[in-house]
Amino acid sequence: MGYRVVVVGATGNVGREMLNVLAEREFPIEELAAVASPRSTGDEIEFGETGRMLKVRNIEHFDFTGWDIALFSAGSDVAKTYGPKAAGQGCVVIDNSSFYRMDPDVPLIVPEVNPEAIDGYKAKNIIANPNCSTAQMVVALKPLHDAAKIKRVVVATYQSTSGAGKAGMDELFEQSRAIFVGDPVEPRKFTRQIAFNVIPHIDSFLDDGSTKEEWKIVVETKKIMDPKIKVTATCVRVPVFVGHSEAINLEFENEISAEQAQRLLREAPGVMLVDKREDGGYVTPIECVGDGATFVSRVREDPTVENGLSLWCVSDNLRKGAALNAVQIAELLGRRHLKKG
């Protein structure tokens, strides 16, 4: 016996990936609905590679009564308007937007890191999925924090254009092509040219000079892992289609060696350690595409601080950073609270 599942925002990059992940992981589904904005109503979308086509339904008229789980990936405005409606009609909402993440009554979950926090979902019948960069980072940090207690995190992200949606990916492609043929390049989605360039700016600027993306990493890491951890981030958009990378520097309360960290990471759930100290002995975004793991490479001790480590972390932002984590939350919810059969 399966669940009645709704995917909201089914026609977007992450929504399509949610359908793929549900199919790949053989999530127990009794009935599945693809829901999107009115402009997509009536379109057909494939459920993974099953060959089964789903007709897209209109979010404005959809009744969530009798449905078990709704995976939302349609932005904060949709989450704000329709999340409470779905939750109030008895459907548990797992939301991929930033709207509910810092709500104290909404658990923010990465199943490998804080699965027990999901027990608080009943307060609003809503569960939040973290920012893509936060999700992969905390998966890598969790086993190290448990072993030696992290005091401070300094992270620089190298985030792909898919994090800005299809428009971001299209802009990278179009600008790259324009440069090769000598056509003019006009930024539209991004504030500067993204092709053959890097942009140290993701989301809007805050009063202290940081961006909202950087703020998200700070506050979400604290909520998911430990409010005492100090975090500072610099988030950069890079000319990559899929896959976020992070250069992470850590300072611990207790001693930890690179070798010990490698052992812990090798055994940690959700982590794939690829760390050979040789040419090509590390993972880049191209290798992580389509994979659900958080890849860690370049683990080494930092001699400039006491009990310091540096590492390189890469993950498919459409998967672990969004769709896969949401489905894993649904699986966790099923095991702990919505048992069927």
Image (cartoon, rainbow, N blue to C red):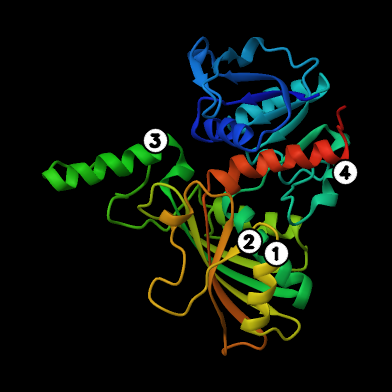
* 306 in relation to 265, above or below: below
Residue pictured at 44% horizontal, 54% vertical: 201
Graded by Cα atoms within 10 Å as few (under 14), some (14 to 19) or many (20 or more), the crowding at tag 3 reads some
The residue wearing badge 2 is 271
Q: Disc 1 to disc 4, how far (Cα)? A: 23 Å
Graded by Cα atoms within 10 Å as few (under 14), some (14 to 19) or many (20 or more), the crowding at tag 2 reads many
Residue pictured at 73% horizontal, 55% vertical: 112
Q: Nearer the viewer, residue 15 or 179?
A: 15
Q: Amino acid at mark 1?
A: Ala
Verify CB contact (< 8 Å) between mark 1 and mark 2: yes
Q: Secondary structure at mark 4?
A: helix
Q: Disc 1 to disc 2, how far (Cα)? A: 6 Å
Q: Residue 278's x, y, as percent? A: 42, 79
For marks 3 and 1, give the one nearer the viewer. 1
Residue pictured at 74% horizontal, 48% vertical: 109
* 77 in relation to 33, above or below: below
Q: Disc 3 to disc 4, how far (Cα)? A: 37 Å
The residue wearing badge 3 is 167
Image side of residue 111 versus residue 239, left or right = right
Tell me, for residue 268, which label it has, or none.
1
Q: Residue 139's x, y, as percent? A: 67, 59
Q: Residue 119's x, y, as percent? A: 88, 43
Q: Amino acid at mark 3?
A: Ala
The residue wearing badge 4 is 119
Q: Amino acid at mark 2?
A: Val
**Residue 295 seen from this side:** yes
Q: Nearer the viewer, residue 158 or 339?
A: 339
Verify CB contact (< 8 Å) between mark 1 and mark 4: no
Q: Disc 3 to disc 2, how far (Cα)? A: 30 Å
